[in-house]
Amino acid sequence: MLRAHLDRRLGDFHLSARLEAGRAETLVLVGESGSGKSTVLRLLAGLLRPDAGRIALDDTVWFDAAAGVELPPWRRAVGWVPQDYALFPHLTVGENVAFGLRSAGAPAQATWLAVRRTLERFGIADLAARRPGELSGGQQQRAALARALALEPPLLLLDEPLAALDVTTRRSVRAELRRLLESLPCVTVFVTHSPAEALVLGDRIAVLEGGRVAQDGPREELLRHPRSGYVAELMGLNLFRGRVVSRAPGGVARVAVGGATLMAMDPGTEDEVFLLVDPREVTLHLGSPAGSAQNLLRGAIAEIVPEPPQGDRLRVVLASEPPIVAEVTAQAVAALALRPGLEVTAAFKATGVRSYR
Amino acid sequence: MARGAPGVRAVALRIATGLAAGVMLALLALPLAALLLRVPPERMLARIGEPVVLAALRLSLITSLAATALVVVLGLPLAWLLATHTFRGKRALELLVDLPMVLPPTVAGLALLLAFGRAGLAGRALSACGVTLPFTTAGVIVAQVFMSAPFFIVPARAGLASVERRYVDAAATLRADPIRTFFHVLLPLARPSLLASVAMSGARALGEFGATITFAGNLPGTTQTMPLAVYLALQTDLQAAVTLSVMLVILSMALLLGLRAVPTHALWRPSDAARASR
C-alpha cells in the first residue's frame, strides 16, 4: 500500500497531491504536460525532495518532513522507468539488468541467474550482449522494464513508457504492458497524458491538473461521475453544471445550465447538480429534428476532430450555449456536409442526460 | 551591377579566408619543419645516448607522470564537485582553478617560491616536517601540478557535467550509492573527455618551463627537465638543443595521437538513440 502526500514548489509551479494505491494495483496519473506527473514520480523515487509531506510504502516511511525522515533513492525500493528509458549506453542489456542486483550486493552467480530469468521473462534473452543503442524502441522499453523489475521492487514507477514508441508498436506494447501490470504483485504508478492509456491500464485513475489532483478514484467512477470539466474532457464526455428548476413526473427534471434549460434524469432532491452527456447520444441535424429528443441546442460548428481509436468516428464541437460535443460517424459528416462554421442543431433525449450531485 | 556585387564580395571573402588560413598554417608549420630538418637523423640518434640528454629525458618523464597522476587524483574530486554541485563562492573557486592558465609561468614560479620557499607562507611548516620543495625534484612536480591542473580540471568538469542526469538518476534508483554511481556510470560515460583532459594536462606538465626554472632552478639530474635542458643547451650547443627539442615534439605528438586513438565507440552520441528508435 502506497500512501503519499506530496508538496513541492518548482518556480511558479506548485505541486500538492495526495495519492493512494493498494498492493498489486495500478494507479494511473493522467494529465497534460506540465501538470506535475513526472514530478510526482521523481518525488516518490527520492530524486527530488518534497518541501513537505510524507511518503510511506506499507509500514516503511520513506519520507516524512515533520519527523525528519528521508531515505535516499538508493535505499528506497523503487523500479523507475523514465520516459526515454535511460538505459546505460556503455553497458550491454544484460549488464544493465544486472546493475541493480550488483548494487544490492548480490553475488555474481545469483546475479547472472536472475538476469537470465528476467531477460527470458521479457523475451529479450537473445539481446543480452547487445548495447542499448542497437535496440529498437520496443526492445529498449522491455530492457528498461526488465532492469527496473529485476530487483522485484514493491513500487514500480513508469513515466510515459509508451510515448517514445511509434504508433504501430505502441498498441501491441500497450496490450503487453497491461498483461504485465496485471501479473505484478507490486504497486505501480503509471504516468501518461493519454486518457486512452489511462482507461486501459488503470485500476485507479488520478487526474492531475496544474499540480493538483482534480479527481481520483476507480476507473468506473471517473467515467460515470466526472467532477470537473477537465476530467470529463479527458474522458471524452460532455459535463455541465446546473441547478434544478423543477421536477416533472416520469423521473425527469428541468435543469438550468447557464442561459439554457436542459431536461435531465431526476437527480433527487439536490438543486446544484452535474449533468453528463455521452457525445454518442447526441445527434446533429441541419433543420429541426423530427424525433422525440427533448433537448435541442443550436450553434455553429467550431471544429471537427477525428477520434483516434475508431478512425470512422468524428467529434463535432458545437459553439452552442452551452457548448456541446457530438460524436458521429464519418458517413454522417459526409451526408450532412458538415464543416466548421455551419449552423446545426444538436439533439439528445432527457434519458441520455445523467445527473448527479 | 546590383546583382554582381554579392558575387564579387563572396569571391573576395573566399580569397581573404584562404589567405588568412594559409598564413596561419605556415606560421604553425614552418618552425616545426625547421626544427626537424636542422639535424640529420643519424646525428640525432647518436646524441640521444649522451648522459645530459638521458638525464633530462628521465627526469621529464618521471616528473610529468607524477604531476599528471597527482592532478588526476586531486583534481577529479574537485572537477566532480564543480560539475554536480552549486554552492556559495563557486564562481570564485572556478576563477582560482582557471588562473594558472592565464598566469605568466615565471609569476607562478615566484608565487610558489613565496608560498613554499624556506621563508614562505607554508614553507616554514614544511621544513619543520623535513620537507624542502624549492630546487628539488619534488619542487619540479609541484610547479608542474600548479601549471597543468586547470588543463585537466576544466575539461574534466565539462565532461562530467555533460553526462546526462537521467543516467545518474537511473543508477540511484538501482540501489547504487553515489560512490558506485561515480565509478560505474559517471566515469565510464565521461571517459573520452576525461582521457582527453589527462592528455592535455600531461602535455602541459611535460612542456612546463617558466614556473619550474623560477621555483626549482636548473640543476642537471635533479630539476633540469627537457625544456630547461633545451634552453641551457641553446647557449652552448645548438645541435643538442635541437635534438632535445625534436624528442619533445615527438613525445607531444605521441600524446596527441594517443588521444586520437581513444576508441570512438566509447563515446555516446545522441544520434545512436535516434537511430535505435527509428
Image (spheres, grey):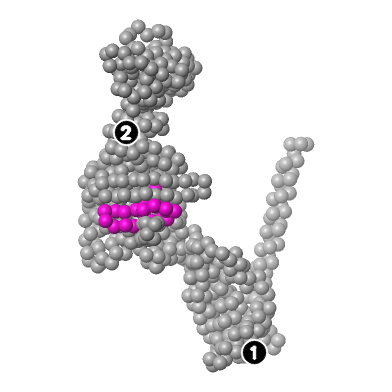
Secondary structure of residue under mark 1: loop
- Residue A204 visible in rendering: yes
Pointers 2 and 1 in contact (C-beta within 8 Å): no
Residue B99 position (above or below residue B247)? above
Q: Which residue is mark 1?
A: B119
Region of the chain picked out in magenta, as a range = A40-62
**Which of B112 and B26 lies nearest the eye of the viewer?**
B112
Residue A268 position (above or below residue B267)? above
Three-letter amino acid code of the residue under disc 1: Ala
**Which of A243 and B139 lies nearest the eye of the viewer?**
A243
Q: Which mark is residue B11?
A: none
Left or right side of A316 for A25: left
Residue B260 position (above or below residue A160)? below
Three-letter amino acid code of the residue under disc 2: Leu
Q: Nearer the viewer, mark 2 or mark 1?
A: 2
Residue A188 in the image, given as x and y percentages of width and height: 29, 47
Pointer 1 chain: B
Residue B140 in the image, given as x and y percentages of width and height: 58, 84
Residue under the image location 33 percent in, 20 percent down: A353
Does A136 appear in magenta? no
Q: Residue furthest front?
A: A269
* Marks 2 and 1, how far apart at CA: 80 Å
- State the image quarter where residue A110 is shown: bottom left
Q: Which residue is mark 2?
A: A222
